[in-house]
Amino acid sequence: MTLSKGSAAVAFLVAFLLLWGCGTQPEPTVRRTLTYTFDASTRDLIHILEKQEIAAYQDFDRDYKGLMVPESLLPLEPFVLGLSTQSQIPAVLILDAPWVQRYAKAGWLYKLDTNKVFAREKLAPSVAEAFSVMMPNHTNQLKKELMAVPTNIKGNILFYRMDLLKKHRVEPPRTWEELATACRKIMPREPRVKYGLLLHVTNFMNDFYPILWGYGGRVIDGAGNRVLGEPQNLARCLAALRDLVKMQGAITPGPKDLEFFETTGSLRRAFYRGEALFMINWNTRLQDLRGMITQGASARPGCLIDMDQVGVLPIPCQQGQKLRYSNIGSFGWGVNRYTVTPEREWIVERAKAFIQLVMEERFQLLAAEKLGQVPALEDALDKVKNKEVLKVYHSAFKVPDMRLKPRPYSRRLNNVLEKHLVKVLYGQRTPEEAVQAALRELKSPGAS
């Protein structure tokens, strides 16, 4: 019998949970081995370091036992059942930034800075902030605590055709008004450019959040309360959506063209082919563009031929706003609080050693060179040689008015907004209708 793709994912998830188990697990009888979850890139980097005969990585699989989580399962959050039933396995988890916020508030994660597992001062401040949560201390006062160690700095940014802006003597835009002006000037003179700006229509909220934040709007406050319905935030959300609608057809694809951008990789392929002046995408797509140029994928007149043609910037903000934002896409290493018990104090030292191995400077620099990842460690950032990584860091993430920010940690909130607000792009709802429909659904029973 052949399993469907969805059935296979469910079967793997069941196997994952059976291997993990629920509730307290027995102590190992032979060797104290730390258990952890990982992604494919982590294992690839470890194998490279093993082959380089670096002593610290030679016995990695003896001391640390990992369970790989396929990327396709991550949206299902396979860690929740084990953590909610206080399982002690795995001890170290690789977590998306919004999960860190949610799991920390649920009491499932171990404080890393206070307990001297990892010092947040070692991290670039912008990404350390995104993985920190206000938590009660021993006197029940709230204090910002590092709850997971980010593997790298990843966020969505604005890609642009640096060569075309220079050719037409246009400055890189900081605001949406400046971006629209650049498109109106350049597009009539560059017939191969079909679109001024491309953004995702699948997972639309990933791109819309930094746009909304750049309009001064908020969906949740610092305590996690929903505030989108408050007059000021509602007005700014509607302003952002209305401005996106105004750009459709002339600058962004119109509703009838959106189907061409519903498949994975369609934005970067169009940008590579020279069809777009600007594009919102994850910073790691710069590495993908380099690969496409190197391979000459579907090369034809107008395609990118050199990485110097591509520039990067923070996503624009509304005119008059002081800050620009990126929706952080980094994952981080968190420690399962239930695995740290008086009988298992060794776990803390072993977890500390594990995180140091996968976060040390050598590991971060290898990830920068091989995967195009921007290091989260401050010391590693000073030693990066990869040109694309340096371009992203200095031109986007290190810009003084740029802020990394995690999307709201409520899955239901994100899903409801996604379902309703993307209909605005397809011309199925007005901005007012879409936002009000989302607010009504969020008020219904079961809203989180």
Image: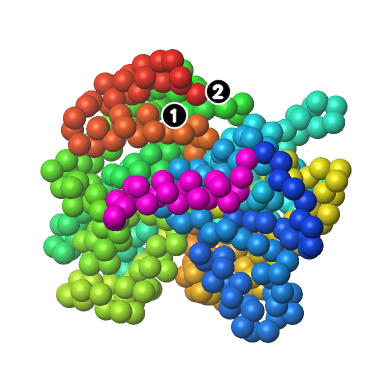
Q: Residue at x 35, y 69 (%)?
A: 289
Magenta region: 1-22
Q: Is residue 302 left or right of residue 210?
A: left
Q: Residue at x 31, y 32 (%)?
A: 419
Give the residue pinned by disc 2.
225
Whether residue 119 is visible: no
- What's the magenta bit mostly, secondary-structure-wise? helix
Q: Residues within 10 Å of mark 2 (few under 14, many from 20)?
A: few
Residue 344, how many percent across, how many down? 82, 49
- First in residue order: circle 2 vs circle 1: 2
Looking at the image, is 223 positioned above or below residue 94? above
Residue 22, how many percent across, how many down? 62, 40
Type of amino acid under label 2: Asn
Give the residue pinned by disc 1.
413
What SS does tag 1 mark?
Answer: helix
Q: Nearer the viewer, residue 48 or 200?
A: 48
Q: Is residue 113 left or right of residue 83?
A: right
Q: Which mark is residue 3?
A: none
Whether residue 261 is visible: yes
Q: Residues within 10 Å of mark 1 (few under 14, many from 20)?
A: some
User: Which quadrant of the rendered structure holds the N terminus?
Assistant: bottom left
Residue 421, how many percent across, how many down? 31, 31
Q: Residue at x 28, y 44 (%)?
A: 201
